[in-house]
């Protein structure tokens, strides 16, 4: 259903923290022109936890309208409380999204049974394709492969974004689930290896700044052209790493601003990229042959 290079889209903002909707729409159009295979709106890279519910829905609505059916739109609809996640997912469904990406609850550390019941309740309440999202490095909650296999029996749970960066985890999920669920990488540095081991795409931070190259890498890998995929991945590897020198999305928003694509706004408690990392991210952009506005570089 979903495949290839799926961008975990940032949310453009002005310096006062207000949403930059014109920039958001222009960014969406740029991604479509650059070959991005799907857009994830209002996810964690989109600062969803720092947006009000109304703002999240505004972002989703504008992305859906701008895409206008040309590529899939997946909404981030995570919430710690199950009833809140159901509400968020229902709201996104009414905006016309093609699916939802739902992260495991953060901080509260539910049991595996709690995770199963959480996702089962959402899937049963909202008839929309659902992608599970496991990112224990951010949530302190790890959804194990046996739990994923149980959830894969539910028809509208169609995939999982696995962001541990462990290829063995992806292999184990595929072994336990077979064709009942699609696996997507949530870790850019290991995404290509994940594809070589059975994943069918990735939900990517790097795709924000290098959408065409990221798309071509996934396309080559999925079509069996490993040599080309590896070549492109080497070009992108500094970005895969240096876009995480500070907490995501701090570096990627700084990079997009220097590319002239978005204003420089970001919401507290996130702050602008520390000066000491500017040259590293700039160097990674140059390595990927991405033009920046040199006059804006400090």
Image (cartoon, rainbow, N blue to C red):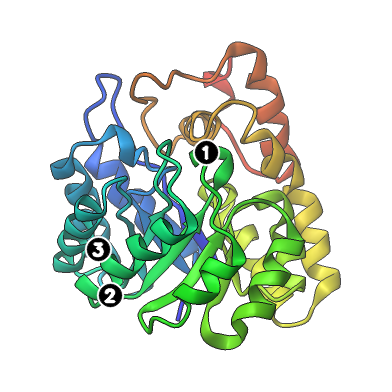
Question: Label 1: which residue?
Answer: 138
Q: Residue at x 21, y 61 (%)?
A: 92
The label shown at residue 128 is 2
Q: Residue at x 53, y 61 (%)?
A: 161
Side (left or right) of 260 relative to 186: left
Q: Horizontal and vertical percent for residue 103?
A: 42, 52
Whether residue 2 is visible: yes
Whether residue 3 is visible: no
Q: Secondary structure at mark 3?
A: helix
Could you classify mark 3 by the number of other residues whose Cα lies within 10 Å: few (under 14), some (14-19), or many (20 or more)? many
For the view shown, which residue lies furthest in the right direction? 227
3D distance between C-alphas at marks 3 and 2: 15 Å
Q: Marks 2 and 1: CB-CB under 8 Å?
A: no
Q: Looking at the figure, which quarter contains the N terminus?
A: bottom left
Question: Label 3: which residue?
Answer: 64
3D distance between C-alphas at marks 1 and 3: 27 Å
Q: Secondary structure at mark 1?
A: helix
State whether residue 252 is above or below residue 154.
Answer: above
Side (left or right) of 18 relative to 41: left
């Amino acid at each position: 259903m979903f495949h290839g290079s799926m961008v975990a889209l940032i949310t453009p903002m002005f310096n006062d923290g207000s949403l930059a909707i014109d920039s958001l729409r222009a960014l969406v159009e740029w991604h479509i022109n650059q070959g991005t295979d799907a857009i994830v709106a209002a996810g964690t890279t989109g600062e969803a936890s720092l947006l009000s519910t109304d703002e999240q829905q505004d972002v989703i609505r504008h992305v859906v309208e701008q895409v206008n059916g040309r590529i899939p739109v997946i909404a981030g609809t995570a919430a710690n409380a199950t009833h809140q996640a159901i509400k968020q997912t229902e709201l996104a469904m009414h905006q016309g999204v093609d699916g939802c990406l739902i992260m495991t609850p953060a901080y509260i550390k539910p049991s595996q049974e709690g995770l199963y019941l959480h996702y089962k309740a959402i899937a049963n309440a909202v008839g929309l394709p659902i992608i599970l999202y496991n990112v224990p490095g951010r949530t302190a909650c790890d959804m194990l492969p046996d739990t994923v296999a149980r959830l894969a029996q539910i028809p509208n749970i169609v995939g999982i974004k696995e962001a541990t960066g462990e290829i063995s985890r992806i292999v184990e999920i595929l072994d336990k689930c077979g064709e009942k669920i699609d696996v997507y990488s949530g870790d850019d540095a290991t995404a290509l290896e994940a594809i070589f081991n059975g994943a069918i795409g990735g939900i990517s931070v790097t795709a924000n700044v290098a959408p065409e190259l990221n798309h071509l890498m996934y396309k080559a890998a999925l079509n069996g052209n490993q040599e080309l995929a590896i070549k492109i991945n080497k070009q992108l590897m500094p970005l895969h790493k240096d876009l995480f020198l500070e907490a995501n999305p701090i570096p990627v928003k700084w990079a997009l601003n220097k590319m002239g694509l978005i204003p420089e706004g970001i919401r507290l408690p996130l702050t602008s990229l520390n000066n000491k990392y500017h040259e590293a991210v700039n160097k990674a952009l140059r390595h990927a042959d991405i033009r920046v506005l040199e006059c804006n570089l400090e």
